[in-house]
Amino acid sequence: MKRSNEVAKNILPKSKKAGEEMEQFQLTTPVTFIIFNRPDTTQKVFEQIRLAKPSKLYIVSDAPRNKEEQKKVEQTRRSVEEHIDWACEIHKNYAQENMGCKARVATGISWVLEQEEDTIILEDDCVPKQEFFRYCQEMLEYYRHNQNVMMVTGTNLMGSKEIAGDYTFSYFSVIWGWATWKRAWDLYDVEMPLWPEARKNKALLSIYGKISYRLFERDAEKVYHHQKDTWDIQWDFTRIYYHGLGIVPKGNLINNIGFNREDATHTTGQSFEDFRYGEIAFPMKMEKIVVRNEKYDKAYLKKYFGIRKIINFIKKKIYN
């Protein structure tokens, strides 16, 4: 499919207060902003990007599905382009034909990581706390060469009960505001060619446990057979298959404002999650030993794959 790849540079001077003694944090990690047809949520996320002033901004956008949607897509793109008022490199990857969630996000991230060694990724409904950017940048740098770590998430909806330090390591890290390295993304394949063998050998069973694995297996089968238009289940599979952990902050740094909207793709319905921001202090105490937090993971599986999830699954089987 044809896409428009554009690079531009803003040459506005960076402002500094005279005689400023305190060193200011500078966001040098490239930020990838994935947008589509929601100018209102896009503006809220972009305002936080604008405050962070990344030195490189990659904008990824799908094309409208029909003529009625075209105005919203164009308005969303303008809401970002016309308000970039700091010195930065601007890279645009705009699809010329609608690609859908699966292909657009997957190819967009791949496009960025063909040019960069790492990136911070935000979608148009994930509003970050300002500290999110520094947290991601420091984690990306500290664990750059550690193959046991494959991503950094800004979302923690589990609370701090199971996390002793400033952050922890988990197999279950959320893609609502996250970051990763090229070395990790290079293992990713949106078509999941390794799934049939992994399913046959039950390679992920020990990580999920029996009940949780059955639910994941159901979703993975739908993705593999092109019955589900998404990209993130494939990323979960890739990380767990290669035993790659994610970094989870002690305090939540992302507010997902995309729920309960008619234009939502996957976050349909009302969310009962507590998206209030948590606290994070710098400098963070870095963890030299990378090991899975099994208590956190068990709590996560209980919350998201526990009895409530099973009851809903059974109801769908009965009534559908």
Image (cartoon, rainbow, N blue to C red):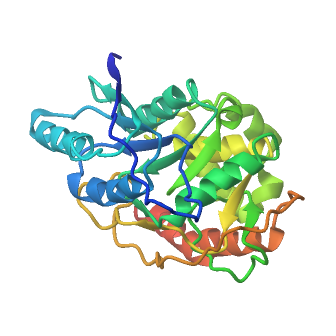
Residue that lies at the very extreme toward the front in this rendered image = 19
Q: Is the residue 34 above or below the residue 110 in the image?
A: below
Hey, which quadrant is residue 252 in on the image? Answer: bottom right
Q: How many marks on residues?
A: 0
Q: Which residue does the image show at 78% across and 62% down from the upper left? A: 209
Quadrant for the C terminus in the image: bottom left
* Location of residue 229 by image quarter: top left
Extreme residue in the top direction: 2
Residue at far right of view? 289
69 vs 193, left or right, is left
- From the top left corner, tell me how far across and down residue 206 is, in percent: 83, 56
Q: Position of residue 196 (x, y in %)?
A: 70, 33
Between 219 and 94, the one lying in front of the other is: 94
Residue at the image position 71 percent from the left and 47 percent from the top: 141
Camera sees residue 277: yes
Give above or below for 105 relative to 319.
Answer: above
Can residue 244 be seen here? The reply is no
Q: Residue at x 67, y 44 (%)?
A: 237
Q: Nearer the viewer, residue 13 or 53?
A: 13
Nearest to the observer: residue 108 or residue 25: 25
Give how far across and how far down residue 167 sits, in percent: 72, 68
Q: Is residue 295 left or right of residue 185?
A: right
> Can you say which quadrant of the picture contains the N terminus?
top left
